[in-house]
Amino acid sequence: MTACNYTDVQSKLLASGFFNSVDIVDCISQTPTLQQLLPYDAIISWSNASYQSGALLGDTFADYVDAGGGVVLAVYATSTMTANRSLTGRWSMGYDVIMPRSGNTGGAVVLGNVLQPMHPVMAGVNALSSTQGARPTTTTLLQGTLLAEWSDGKILAAVGSNPRRVDLGLYPPSSACTANFWDETTDGGRLMANALLYVATASGPTPIGASYCNPSVPNTTGSSATLIAGGSASVSANDVTLTAEQLPANQFGFFLTSQTQGLVANPGGSQGNLCLGGTIGRYVAPGQIKNSGAGGAFDLVLNLTQTPAGPAFVSINAGESWNFQAWFRDIGPMGQPWSNFTDGRTVTFQ
């Protein structure tokens, strides 16, 4: 693939000095396999043409992230409404950061508010401009943290709850290809290189399981709260941490679990959906009721031999699938007490 839209990005990444090599992989006429991607530390993908299969590529990219690879998605993969130019399949089960398929906006734009100036993705990114500036219309994240905005408030960069995921509201080729793309004298190349380096070297618990019942009903922050599970799905390892994110600040909450999935809208006057059924256990023992703090998140290290199942406690066994969700308090616009839920997370233990 020798078109400028590919080789320009390749040259910008190599010029950063962060990488020993940068290869171009064709996803238009073929879908790479997991085995083809595993030798790479990280990949960046964008679209202005249809993938051979957005569903198959989504499955492969999800498998790649689960195996420890880093993925950066950029416009139009993060924004297009055109069929097969975004990732679907298993990717849609908790890997998107920016709400996908929201459409695009354009027009002259420059770097706007940098909300996380000390984040590695934003290091050395001091200027960015474009006379056209294709970017997502949405300002909604499904998970993670907003790092920077364009001058019109649209999303420029966001990192997922899984640090091996970054989404960019930037079309990667520069003005070296087309004059109205991002100005190559500004820091778009550095932004892309930073994002790739970050997801390639990200540390933290390995995410396990899959999201369902998502996105959750937005809480009063405007965000949909998310639940991730990190660690190991091995029962013998007994190493699982649940983390609830995108919560309102300084509110109490706790985790729930069941072997049965369900869907109950607004239980007990909640603004959200309970995504569990059957016998539901509550993690409310001493030390298990949490506060979201200033960062709007809380977590819990599980003991798989002491899993609440109604009033009893049971051990999780290999081969069983368990579902998890977090409930949390919220404060309504008139000061009335509300509550809400994260999305659900299902884990099949080994």
Image (cartoon, rainbow, N blue to C red):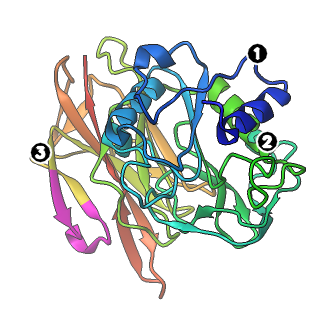
- Name the residue beneath numbered marker 1: 20
Tell me which numbered mark, 2 or 1, is placed earlier along the sequence: 1
The residue at 54%/53% (across/down) is: 76
Q: Specify the quadrant of the image occupied by residue 59.
A: top left
Name the kind of residue labelled 3 in the image: Thr
Q: Which of marks 2 and 3 is in front?
A: 2
- Name the residue beneath numbered marker 2: 189
Q: Where is residue 228 in the image (x, y as percent from the top left)?
A: 42, 40
Query: Is 77 left or right of 203, judged from the image as shown?
Result: left
Query: Is 53 left or right of 42, judged from the image as shown?
Result: left
The residue at 42%/51% (across/down) is: 226
The residue at 41%/44% (across/down) is: 87
Seen from the viewer's position, the closer of residues 267 and 91 is 91
Residue 266 on the magenta segment? yes
The quadrant of the image that shows the N terminus is top right
Residue 316 on the magenta segment? no
- Name the residue beneath numbered marker 3: 279
Circle 2 crowding by C-alpha within 10 Å: few under 14, some 14–19, many from 20: many
- Stretch of the chain drawn in magenta: 262-273
The quadrant of the image that shows the C terminus is top left
Q: Where is residue 269 in the image (x, y as percent from the top left)?
A: 25, 75
Q: Where is residue 180 in the image (x, y as percent from the top left)?
A: 75, 61
Q: Where is residue 212 in the image (x, y as percent from the top left)?
A: 28, 47
CA gap between label 2 and label 3 equals 52 Å
Circle 1 crowding by C-alpha within 10 Å: few under 14, some 14–19, many from 20: few
Circle 3 crowding by C-alpha within 10 Å: few under 14, some 14–19, many from 20: few
For residue 163, say whether it is visible.
Answer: no
Name the kind of residue labelled 2 in the image: Gly
CA gap between label 1 and label 3 equals 53 Å
